[in-house]
Amino acid sequence: MKVLITGANSILSKRLVLEHPNDEVHVLYYSQPSNQKAEYFPVSHIAQLNTDYNIVYIVSAVITNDANKNDEIYEVNIKWVQSICNRFTHSKVIFFSSVAVYDNIDSGVIDEKTLPSPKSIYGISKLWGEKIVEQHPQYGIIRISSMYDEEMKQTTFLPKIIESAIKDNHITLLGDGSRIQNYIHAKDVAFLAKRVAMYNNNVILLGVSPENHTNKEVAQIIKKTINCTIDFKGEDLSRSVDYKPSNHALYQQPFTTLEQGVKELIQWKIKQY
């Protein structure tokens, strides 16, 4: 089987390569190739690639709401998606979207029957990308929640409070810590994506773990590994929603618990110091 992955250095791309150990895997990169076992090409070589891939994973994305980067967002999140779909017309295209397509919904329960309602630049761009992919003959769309893994960017809530616990032996949460979020390990997203790729029908799924957690629960999970203190300050005005995965057969897989994933992430992080 031939597999193409667009975007070389994300935590998800690396997990996708591992999901295809016996397949011919090619990866398109923007800046530099990864060091995994696969064949790498710069994105400028897309026209030179054969179009006989069985699966094409669209991972690459510009994740920002900075209006100064609108051109870059359009080029990668929309125009690039259209280029992939236009070229690989006989492949199964797997598009990694985001729960940001629901970011105008501030509270309550979101499942796969919930209509998208984006308000952010990023959320709108991902929904636009989805609409392009839905016109492809064979596709799967996965709307990912907060994905984590080793080597993830240290700019979001989870890696920030882990670093605070390690460096300062302390975690500070906004409000009372009751904000709900959903965290899914990158290897679980990759496993789900391969199942979607092998599935005969077109499908749109939530890429979420079975359990949601409050910020306070996340901090307490970290405290089990690092005996840090936790305090609260101010008010948390961030959206707080409960994601509910469907009973679709594709979800019948073991998911990494947040307890196990956080423990592994902490162990990896400590080794970096």
Image (cartoon, rainbow, N blue to C red):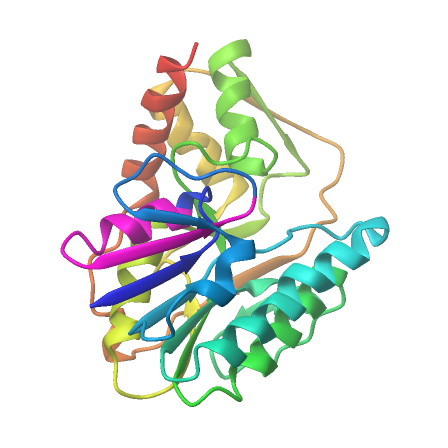
Between 251 and 91, the one nearer to me in the picture:
91
Nearer to the camera, 165 or 108:
165
Q: Which of the 4 image quarters holds residue 98? A: bottom right
- Answer with left or right where residue 143 lies relative to residue 117: left
**145 relative to 131, above or below:** above
Could you tell me which residue is drawn at 35 percent across and 43 percent down? 258
Residue 96 screen position, x and y as percent:
48, 64
**Snapshot quadrant of residue 31:** top right
Vertical arrangement, residue 106 with respect to residue 214, above or below: below
The extreme left residue here reads 22
Note whether residue 229 is visible: no
Q: Which residues are magenta?
A: 12-30
Where is the N terminus found, in terms of image quarters? bottom left
Q: Residue at x 48, y 58 (%)?
A: 59
Residue nearest the viewer, comparing 118 with 25? 25
Whether residue 155 sits left or right of residue 183 in the image: it is right
Q: Say whether residue 18 is magenta.
A: yes
Q: Where is 181 relative to 134, above or below?
A: above
